[in-house]
Amino acid sequence: MAKFKAKDRPHIDPGNPTWVTVRDWAEDHRAAIRRLREDHTADLRKLDQLLGAIGSLTDLLNLPEEIREAKKDPVPDENHFGIPAPNGDI
């Protein structure tokens, strides 16, 4: 499986109807899983599996921001505004 590279992916428009549907589904599913984790009769293994599912859904919901951040160009150097740096110590 190829490594996922966020910077190579297209931006996800938060208002896109497909993304809105996926986001709403993931939020509802995550809320349901959180309710299942509140069951005090569940064994530790089941609680760990549910926690992993919550983490995966949270990662999915953060995907648009992750892609946006990955596409930001880093500042090339400290003189990026074209203003000459002062000579000597400040």
Image (cartoon, rainbow, N blue to C red):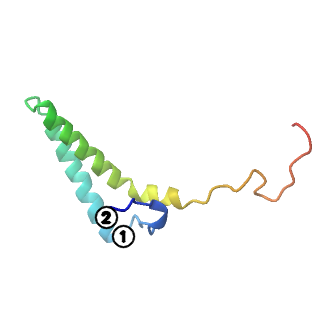
| Relative to 10, 28 lies left or right | left
Q: Residue placed at 34% from the left, 51% from the top?
A: 59
Q: Position of residue 79 (x, y in %)?
A: 79, 53
- Classify residue 75 as left or right of residue 62: right
Work out which quarter of the rendered image holds the C terminus and state it: top right
Residue 81 is tagged as none
Q: How crowded is mark 2: few (under 14 residues within 10 Å), some or many (20 or more)?
A: few
Q: Which mark is residue 20?
A: 2
- State the residue at coordinates (15%, 35%): 45
Amino acid on which the number 2 mark rests in the picture = Val
Give the Cα distance between marks 1 and 2. 6 Å
Across and down, in percent, residue 14 comes to: 40, 64
User: Which residue shows up at 34% across the image and 54% down it?
Assistant: 61
Looking at the picture, does residue 58 appear above or below residue 11?
above
**Which numbered tag is attached to residue 16?**
1
The image quarter containing residue 80 is bottom right
Residue closer to the observer: 19 or 60: 60
What's under tag 1, amino acid-wise?
Answer: Asn
**Residue at (44% x, 67% y) in the render:** 9
| Quarter where residue 73 is shown | bottom right
Helix, strand or loop for disc 1: loop
Q: Residue lying farthest left?
A: 41
| Quadrant, the N terminus | bottom left
**How many numbered marks are there?**
2
Q: Which residue lies furthest to the right in this view?
A: 87
| Of 3 and 45, the residue lying toward us | 3
Image location of residue 85, percent across then percent down: 86, 49
Q: Do the residues labelled 1 and 2 touch (CB within 8 Å)?
A: yes
Report whether 16 appears left or right of 75. Answer: left
Q: Is residue 39 above or below residue 86?
A: above
Q: Is mark 2 on a helix, strand or loop?
A: helix
